[in-house]
Amino acid sequence: MGSQSEMLIFANWSTLTVCMVLKFPQIFSVMSAKSAEGVSLKSVLLELSGFLVFLRYQMYYSYPIETYLEYPMLILQDAFLLLLMFHYSGSVKTALPYAGIFFAAWHILVLQKWIIDLALNLCTVISASSKFLQLQCLWQSKDSGQASALTWGFATYTSATRIFTTLMTTGDQAVLFRFIVMLALNAWVTCVILKYRKKTKKTD
């Protein structure tokens, strides 16, 4: 029992630590290149939507804060990444309508219990769609561009640790299913980025 408790503490804190810098490799890659080539805007928007819904769900049901503490940090990092992407594409003003939509959704989600429950189920679909959009972007260009394998590798690790922490704490089946799907897709995107990065280097 003691070893399980220690493993749970390690999983929670390692996840939190990784998530504090999870998007940094991607952000630095975009900033250094002054380009978001290879990074799907639609994917990041959907990912941010999924993060917001998941955070709201966990807060609504008063789950242990250590099981979702990383989400505010992930949301801030995604928001900053989006601003960079809008900046380098010359469309910063486009960010304002999205900010308004996210703000409104945050409050609408908790108006009724059925809304937040439905939103979590849709959240898994939304988050999965964000991964497929990133994969589509990579497949079409056959070039990883500024997509960061390290960021996606970090995401794969945190999905794995959250499967463990969910099993050890809330046991919420919807949450568990979401993390299993995210683990598979994050690992897939990481592999595709590495595949096209190697091809690009060989061509160079």
Image (spheres, helix red, strand yellow):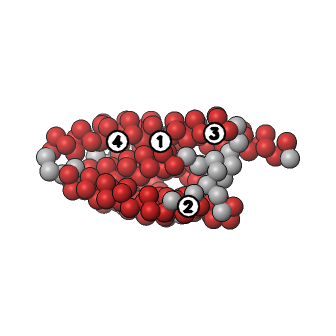
Whichever of callouts 3 and 1 sits on the residue coming sooner in the sequence is: 1
Residue placed at 62% from the left, 43% from the top? Answer: 190
Whichever of callouts 4 and 1 sits on the residue coming sooner in the sequence is: 4
Q: Quick check: can you spot residue 99? A: yes
Residue 90, labelled with which disc? 2
Question: x%, y% of residue 192?
Answer: 65, 38
Q: What element carries label 3?
A: helix
Q: Is mark 2 on a helix, strand or loop?
A: loop
Question: x%, y% of residue 58?
Answer: 27, 52
| Mark 2 → mark 4, Cα distance in angstroms | 30 Å
The residue singled out by tag 4 in the image is 123
Nearer to us of marks 3 and 2 is: 2
In the displayed structure, does residue 175 sit left or right of residue 16?
A: left
Question: x%, y% of residue 145?
Answer: 69, 49
Whichever of callouts 3 and 4 sits on the residue coming sooner in the sequence is: 4
Amino acid type, residue under disc 4 in the picture = Cys
Residue placed at 64% from the left, 51% from the top? Answer: 37
Q: Residues within 10 Å of mark 4 (few under 14, many from 20)?
A: many
In the displayed structure, does residue 178 sit left or right of residue 190?
A: left
Nearer to us of marks 2 and 1 is: 2
The residue singled out by tag 3 in the image is 138
Amino acid type, residue under disc 2 in the picture = Gly
Whether the residues at callouts 3 and 1 have beta carbons within 8 Å, the answer is no
Whether the residues at callouts 2 and 4 have beta carbons within 8 Å, the answer is no
Whether the residues at callouts 2 and 1 have beta carbons within 8 Å, the answer is no
Amino acid type, residue under disc 3 in the picture = Leu
